[in-house]
Image (tube, grey):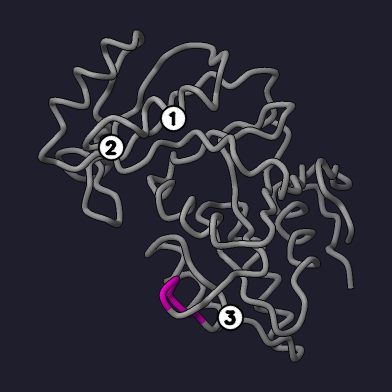
């Protein structure tokens, strides 16, 4: 059974991604609204007999997966992940990404790195000619001021991401602070990714430029999906 086409681009992309999941797979489960549709479809397939293990990239994803009856394991419990399905905030023509508006980019990178294949689900609004940011940056609290100063010397501006419905900064599932680095158009995503990640105190930034050779991007549209990158479904 293929996904229904119903005028909701995110749902169409999320459902299409679920068709890549085969019986017996270990599947990384990303964070975000489009992946939630994938989990909806996987829950239906599990009721029909599909056997999988999910590896969640955030507490939120783990909660949603349990609500849907998807069996879970931690990254420590598995030796490899067959494929990971995740979202993105920006996608450029070379399939380089900005992720992390859900503050889960560090765990998402760990799960992607353990995977044989990465499927990104999004709607067309996430496609861009050039990555522009802002770039989420996860920082240990001890180094907050130091990292802000280092980022400011690179140009652009830095904002500590404030929580919604709470006072104070957004904290990641790892207990770290999230910054948003506004640099304008990013001419060298791989270079900027490396430069930010090499600052002592940075746990990881939201530029992901290293996974394009293992990536399929599913762009949901009103009446179908567009497939970019690897496609052997």
* Residue at the image point whose x is 56% and y is 18% from the top: 188
- Residue at 50%, 39% (x, y): give it: 99
Foreground disc of the pair 3, 1: 1
The magenta-colored residue range is 72-76
- Compare marks 2 and 3 and give the one earlier in the sequence: 3
- The earlier-in-sequence mark between 3 and 1 is 3
Q: Position of residue 86 (x, y in %)?
A: 60, 53
Disc 1, SS: helix
Looking at this view, name the residue that lies furthest to the bottom: 49
The mark found on residue 53 in the picture is 3
Tags 2 and 3 touching, CB below 8 Å: no
Residue on which the image places disc 2:
202
- Taking the magenta stretch, the answer to whether it contains residue 74 is yes
Q: Counting other residues with Cα less than 10 Å from the Cα at mark 3, is it few (<14), some (14-19), or many (20 or more)?
A: some
Outermost residue on the left side: it is 142
Frontmost residue, 106 versus 196:
196
Where disc 2 sits, the SS reads strand
Which residue position holds label 1?
Answer: 194
Q: Is residue 63 above or below residue 137?
A: below
């Amino acid at each position: 059974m293929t996904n229904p086409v119903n005028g909701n681009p995110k749902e169409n992309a999320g459902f299409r991604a679920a068709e890549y999941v085969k019986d017996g797979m270990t599947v990384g489960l990303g964070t975000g609204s489009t992946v939630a549709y994938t989990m909806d479809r996987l829950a239906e397939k599990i009721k029909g007999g599909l056997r999988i293990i999910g590896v969640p990239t955030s507490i939120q994803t783990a909660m949603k997966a349990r609500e849907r009856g998807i069996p879970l394991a931690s990254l420590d419990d598995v030796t490899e992940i067959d494929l990971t399905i995740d979202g993105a905030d920006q996608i450029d023509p070379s399939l380089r990404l900005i992720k992390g508006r859900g503050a889960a980019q560090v765990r998402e990178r760990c799960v992607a790195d353990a995977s044989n294949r990465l499927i990104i689900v999004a709607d067309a609004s996430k496609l861009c000619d050039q990555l522009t940011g802002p770039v989420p940056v996860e920082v240990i609290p001890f180094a907050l001021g130091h990292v802000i100063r280092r980022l400011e010397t690179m140009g652009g501006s830095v904002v500590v991401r404030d929580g919604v419905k709470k006072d104070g900064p957004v904290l990641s599932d790892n207990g770290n602070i999230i910054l948003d680095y506004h640099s304008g158009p990013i001419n060298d995503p791989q270079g900027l990714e490396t430069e930010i990640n090499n600052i002592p105190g940075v746990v990881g930034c939201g530029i992901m430029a290293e996974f394009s050779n293992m990536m399929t991007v599913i762009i949901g549209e009103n009446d179908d999906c567009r497939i970019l990158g690897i496609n052997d479904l």
